[in-house]
Amino acid sequence: MMAGLPGTGIGGMFYVGLTLAMPFRELYRAVRGKSNAQRWSFIGIQLGFVVAIVAGMWGEAWALGRLIEWCATLDWMGSGWQHSMTQAKMMSYVIPGGALICLASVVALFFGLKLVVKLGEKSRKVAATTAADMQGEAA
Amino acid sequence: MMSSSVIADETSGNATLRESTGTLEQPQTQASSQKSLSNLTVMVPAYNEAASIVDTIRSIQAQTIPPDEIIVIDDCSTDNTSELAAACGVTVLRPEKNTGTKAGAQNLALAQVKTEFVMAIDADTTLAPNAIALLLPAIKTPNTVAVCGFVLPRFVKTLWERGRYVEYMFAFTFFKQVQNYYDRPLISSGCFSMYRTSILQAQGGWSTRTMAEDMDLTWCFHEAGYGVKFVPDALCYPIEPHDFCFMNKQLKRWSHGFVQNVRLHWRGILNVKVLGLMVTVSLWDATVASIAYLFILPLLAIFVNPLFVLGYLIDIPAVIVPVLYEAIRRKEVGKAMASIPSFFVLRTLNSCHMLLALWREVVLRRRLSVYEKGH
């Protein structure tokens, strides 16, 4: 089964990020003698995916931009298309930028939650120890 | 023609249909004449799987390294699943009453497994001939307790099968490989996974507390510090939902299963490196991306600018690249490219189910507990 929505949203970006981190992790493993050629070959393929994906998305954005410009030259909607071009240009920055900020926020939220849970567990332990000590003293 | 007999298992109180009848054709016996290379038992839970059980059993028997035993758990089918399975020369277990879930059926057989390794495979799934041979080295690596393989739909004809085909090609080529690199496959697929029997038995087998018992088990293993691996060259071919009704039931089960597992495991997986982050991102996408996909983009397209419709196409390269790579390797480029549009239809349905599952499980607190395969 697939959890989440493959390809959409920040999930794809997250896995791209994990893939970009692979060479650094593998270098660390290589220093400790835990790497091999097969693993590097696998990383090469995954990085190839990332390069192709980024190139594809850039190419797609470029093609869509040219399409909108061409539609503007036909003057079907008059100034409407100029307005659309401006908005399309804005979208091409806002959407990836927004997604990156989103991803960074989710990662920050995750570590924040982890910290909160850890502190909560610690304070529960301390409270339990204190209660046990007090019971012992009372006895 | 030999007739099979029903043998009452007095220790468990279950009636079991034992041993072969050899009626339909001369089946390959269960590796009795071969030295055991696998130390493996394969379990096949089945409920009304007469249409596919024989193909499944045959594909297991045709493995380059066959298992020591094949057990079909016939969960009180109303068709002739038992008879067909028995005719293939495998052990058939039949409980007195329906266990209610796939997990329940599998646990029934798990108690009887004596081999070091055990494999669970769905009754509508066939294996590539070398699937077991490829999984065995992986399960034997230290600390590894579960291994899974690549899943591809057996039939790719209808819109829904095509959508699922692209979904699997994408996920197993890109996402799962990355998860595996970080030693954190999110799910050891329930339709095709191999386990260390002793660890699985100590774990209590598959739990029935969620609708996605494979995810529950995998996350339990991760939390306990055990290794789970993905072997991309080990292939299996399940029959995927071919129509809307069937797909609906499956997605409902999977979506609820995901939410149930997140609620159950969230504390535990926070401490599992990378896994917690993967699940958090998946949950975010399941929620926010679904809302954007279903509501925000259409509203923006209608009320602000029609160009917002392009938002549905933005990640086409992200999907196409891994799918095309794998399709070229498998010489299935035409099939893959023709199936891409179906993926976006399936993804829309998936979004609906995710949001509904979150709404019912989290807000309404109405837990889905009835396991319905859908056919």
Image (cartoon, coloured by chain):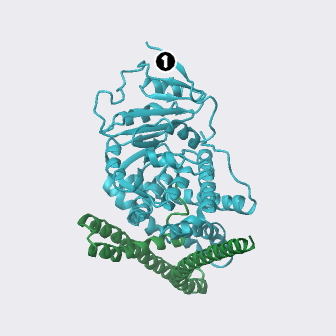
Residue at the farthest left position: A37
Give coordinates of residue A44: x percent, y percent: 30, 70
Q: Nearer the viewer, residue B240 or B224?
A: B224
Residue B154 in view here: no
Kindly indicate which chain is depicted in cyan in the rendered structure.
B
Residue at (57, 24) in percent of width and height: B10
Residue to which mark 1 is pinned: B4
* Quadrant the C terminus of chain B occupies: top right
Q: Nearer the viewer, residue B38 or B76?
A: B38
A135, above or below B233, in the image: below
Q: Nearer the viewer, residue B346 or B93?
A: B93
Give coordinates of residue B5: x percent, y percent: 51, 17
* Dot 1: element: loop
> Seen in the image, is B307 located left or right of residue B182?
right
> Seen in the image, is B99 located left or right of residue B41?
right
Give coordinates of residue B132: x percent, y percent: 35, 44
